[in-house]
Image (cartoon, helix red, strand yellow):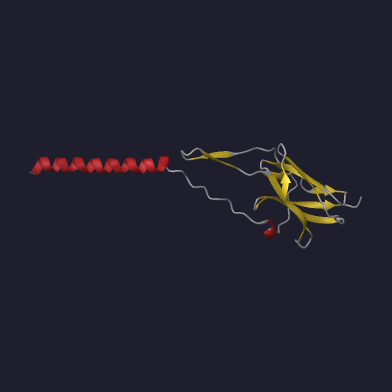
Amino acid sequence: MGYTSLRMNIKVALGIVIVAIILVISFFLLHPRTVSAPTTVTPAEQSATASTTSQPSQLQQTSQKLGTTGATITELIARFNSIPIVSTSAYPTISGIANTPKVGIIINNSKDKGIVGTANIPVIRGQWSYSTSVALVPGTYTVVLFVGKTVTEVASLIVNAP
């Protein structure tokens, strides 16, 4: 029983190890990766003011494939055309770019209370525009741009007297 039996046991053990390695490799190659959702802040919770003065970049979609399932995740992009937003109208028009069917806006007063806005601004050929339905007195406001429940950008709106 000695040498032949030991040799057979080693072959069986090697076979089991090889099968286990193949299963582990297959799992990592074929199992789709999970992608954690970005942390979102609802527009009501947003109270930060914008400090940037740069122009938004051109609309560029970035996407990534998930595992071998072929599913694609596209980054949500929604931006203002200019920051800060300056207007001499009591009913300012705010515009921007997006790669989603709709965007939303909330205009907050100096106490971060929403005074006007909507979640249903249509995006047509990558462009959106919103005119306030409430007259704004001269001053500085915070504008929150969002897609669904995800805040994509915050800017200052400066309304000057005409």
Q: Residue 139 sits in which quadrant?
A: bottom right
Q: Decide: is 127 above or below 153.
A: above
Q: Is residue 55 visible?
A: no
Q: Residue 126 sits in which quadrant?
A: top right
Q: Is residue 158 visible?
A: yes
Residue projecting furthest to the right? 162
> Quick check: 19 left or right of 112?
left
| Residue drawn at the location 87% of the way across and 55% of the way down | 138
Q: How many marks?
A: 0
Q: Decide: is 29 above or below 147.
A: above
| Residue drawn at the location 13% of the way across and 43% of the way down | 6
Split into 4 quadrants, where in the image is the N terminus? Answer: top left
Residue 47: x %, y % from top left: 71, 59
Residue in the foreground of this view, choosing between 27 and 161? 27
Residue in the foreground of this view, choosing between 34 and 131? 131
Residue 95: x %, y % from top left: 77, 44
| Residue drawn at the location 70% of the way across and 39% of the way down | 57
Residue projecting furthest to the bottom? 111
| Residue drawn at the location 78% of the way across and 48% of the way down | 84
Residue 135: x %, y % from top left: 86, 55
Q: Decide: is 88 above or below 126.
A: below
Residue 131: x %, y % from top left: 81, 48
> Quick check: 72 left or right of 30?
right
> Quick check: 33 left or right of 63?
left
> Quick check: 5 left or right of 68?
left
